[in-house]
């Protein structure tokens, strides 16, 4: 299989998304995608990178033979895709981790089904002014995500690397700044919407950035992250999600199968050589 240069892929993906978004206006909905003339159109919401790029690869190379047509809508925000799925504007979304989905279901009462993880985007600590943890100064300000799932994940990353210590018995996935027991450098933590952090790194000593936002910002996790989550056996794999009522829909099941194909694995491995995305299967 031909490897796609990242810059070329982004151009193809951007153009493709615009066309695909118009391909099946009104398809899908609360009843789930239906087959029409041998083709099932699936409305999928996704983060632009790498999720929509992976879906674009599926659309360009695998979907037709499987009788699928993907109509994709890109979302920068972490809240809207689940609301759109719940409202029936989407048939599925592809952007979230198990801990984020769990927090959303608890908070908003969604009744969703998650398939197995497709890839991991390691979360990392980035900075425009320092290159190692040793350079953090007393009282430095660190940006972390404001949503509970990614906030806890970010604090866990810092705790795992000895920057802070979380109180005993605290579930790292649900950790908040109030759960910090030891903060030897008296670091200050500012909570921001996750997408804003890479755009405002210059305002902080460092910021904890989700993998997809690092990718969109042109950061290279394997080279530029001061510390980076381990991708192997990660509990934070990204997965295809649909409404519980649609979990057995043949089109959505087939899409998930394609996302776990050897072709997609190879695509991820050959495209995200900077460590921004790692196959989870």
Image (cartoon, grey):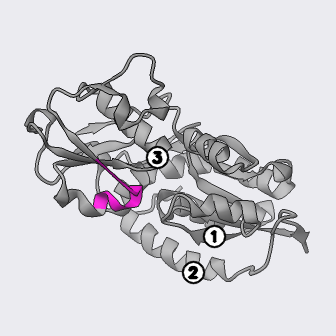
Instruction: Please provide percent x and percent y for residue 15.
Output: 52, 79
Left or right relative to 227: residue 41? right
Q: Residue at x 10, y 32 (%)?
A: 134
| Mark number displayed over residue 269 | 3
Q: Nearer the viewer, mark 1 or mark 3?
A: 1
Q: Between residues 163 and 267, which one lies in front from this camera angle?
A: 163
Q: Which residues are magenta?
A: 190-198
| Mark number displayed over residue 72 | 1
**Quadrant assignment, res 57:** bottom right
Q: Which comes sooner in the sequence, label 2 or label 3?
A: 2
Q: Give the residue at mark 2.
A: 18
Q: Is residue 77 visible?
A: yes
From the viewer's perspective, is residue 226 above or below residue 94? above
Instruction: Please provide percent x and percent y for residue 261.
Output: 65, 46
Q: Which comes sooner in the sequence, label 1 or label 3?
A: 1
Q: Which comes sooner in the sequence, label 2 or label 1?
A: 2
Q: Residue furthest top?
A: 168
Q: Residue at x 78, y 55 (%)?
A: 252
**The N terminus sits in image quarter:** bottom right
From the viewer's perspective, is residue 260 above or below residue 86? above
CA–CA distance between discs 2 and 3? 26 Å
Disc 3 residue crowd, few under 14, some 14–19, many 20+, Cα 10 Å = some
CA–CA distance between discs 1 and 3? 23 Å
């Amino acid at each position: 299989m031909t490897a796609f240069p990242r810059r070329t892929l982004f151009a193809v993906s951007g153009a493709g998304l615009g066309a695909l978004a118009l391909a099946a206006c009104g398809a899908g909905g609360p009843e789930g995608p239906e087959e029409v003339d041998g083709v099932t159109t699936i409305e999928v919401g996704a983060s632009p990178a790498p999720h929509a790029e992976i879906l674009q690869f599926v659309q360009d190379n695998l979907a037709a033979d499987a009788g699928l047509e993907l109509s994709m809508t890109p979302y920068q925000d972490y809240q809207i895709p689940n609301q759109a799925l719940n409202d029936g504007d989407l048939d599925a979304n592809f952007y979230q981790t198990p801990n984020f989905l769990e927090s959303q279901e608890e908070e908003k009462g969604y009744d969703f089904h998650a398939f197995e993880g497709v890839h991991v985007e390691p979360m990392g600590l980035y900075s425009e002014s320092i290159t190692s943890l040793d350079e953090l100064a007393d009282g430095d300000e660190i940006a972390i995500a404001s949503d509970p799932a990614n906030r806890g994940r970010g604090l866990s990353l810092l705790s795992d690397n000895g920057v802070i210590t979380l109180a005993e018995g605290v579930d790292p996935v649900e950790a908040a700044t109030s759960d910090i027991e030891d903060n030897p450098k008296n670091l200050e933590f500012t909570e921001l919407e996750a997408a804003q952090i890479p755009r405002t790194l210059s305002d902080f000593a460092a910021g904890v950035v989700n993998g997809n936002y690092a990718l969109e910002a042109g950061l290279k996790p394997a080279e530029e992250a001061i510390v980076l989550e381990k991708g192997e056996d990660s509990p934070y794999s990204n997965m295809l999600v649909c409404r519980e009522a649609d979990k057995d829909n043949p089109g959505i099941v087939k899409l998930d199968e394609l996302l776990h194909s050897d072709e997609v694995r190879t695509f991820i491995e050959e495209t995200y050589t900077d460590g921004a995305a790692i196959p989870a299967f």
